Amino acid sequence: MLLSLYIVNKSGGLIYHRDFSSLAKLDTNDTLRLGSIWHSLHAISSQLSPVPGCKGIELLQAETFDLHNFQTPTGIKFFAVAECNSQGVDRFLKRVYGLYADYVLKNPFYELDMPIRCELFDLQLTSEVTLTMNA
Amino acid sequence: MSSKAKGASPGGGDRINSELFTLTYGALVRHLLLDLESPEEVNKQLDKMGQNIGIRLVDDFLAKTNTGRCRNFREAAKTIAETGFRMFLGCSAKVTQIDDKECKMVLSENPLTDFVELPEKLQPLSYCSLLCGVIRGALEQISMKVECEISKDPLKGDERFELHMRLVEYVNEEYPFKDD
């Protein structure tokens, strides 16, 4: 079960956030801050690796949730917080990347690296989330 | 050029009439010529527009083809030629010459120029420099700085359409960034 989704641009700014459950919500400032902290953590994690070519944290498992991270070759991070042992979250994140490429980047009025305010994207995301939750 | 039909998933291979695309591009070039007056300026402008397209298009490519990161220039050039052109322009391209820093690719056909005859006085115009910009913009996003130009152009009497790509540098985006 998905709890929330974050999209962070390549310089660490949060450009999208959405909660999918009514559990305790973070306020906007907190999400912004957490988004950039995650960006840095991710960078640090790839430096910690003794083996070169590490791409950073992909999955973080905590007692009460899982955090799945997907970073594109262009440096955008899609990460989702989900209940422990949720299935299909990685696939979900890749689909969201596809939606982002279609409904955000192809929207001529979207400015790169700015917060995403695209209604079509919201709509498509909603149906993708429903699909994943019911799978 | 793939486009979306209402209700269908975009990029899923639905097509629009390619003439609409070809003619739209022609109209665009025509308009730029009117606005900017010199063909050299138009080349620059087309290239810049292409770059802006490439910057966005690269994510579309990566999301839909599931290609991993290209590790080097050779791999990137091959991917562009074999998958990129087919996906976005509906024609195939072949890499004819390649080494670690330079490559040449030949397009089997070029839908942009289907109906085009270049008038004598517009010889300096490189009609398709948009394509060069797209490639440059796309590779810029995956940390490769390249230069790209049209080396052979049927509009100028050559036999085939050939692009020449040259690697300038790999832009390192790994942390920590070096202090300037």
Image (cartoon, rainbow, N blue to C red):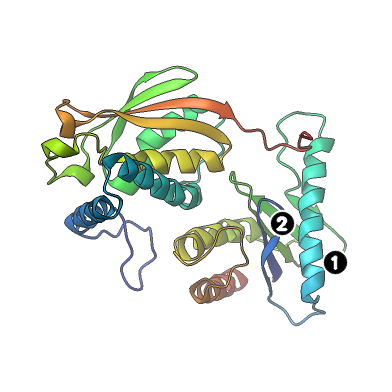
Question: Which residue is located at x 50 percent, y 47 percent?
Answer: B62
Is the N terminus of chain A in the top left, top right, bottom left or bottom right quadrant? Answer: bottom right
Which residue was labeled with disc 2?
A68
Closest to the camera, between mark 1 and mark 2, is 2
From the top left corner, tell me how far across and down residue B76 is, in percent: 47, 32
Residue B102 coordinates in the image, percent (x, y): 44, 21
Give left or right: position of B47 versus B168: left
Amino acid identity at mark 2: His
CB within 8 Å, label 1 to label 2: no
For numbered disc 2, what is the local secondary structure?
strand
Amino acid type of the residue that numbered disc 1 sits on in the rendered structure:
Thr
- At horizontal 47% and vertical 66% (from top left) the residue drawn is A103
Whether residue B9 appears in this view of the structure is yes
User: Which of the image's four quarters has the C terminus of chain A?
Assistant: bottom right
Residue B72 sits above or below residue A36 on the image:
above
Mark carried by residue A64: 1
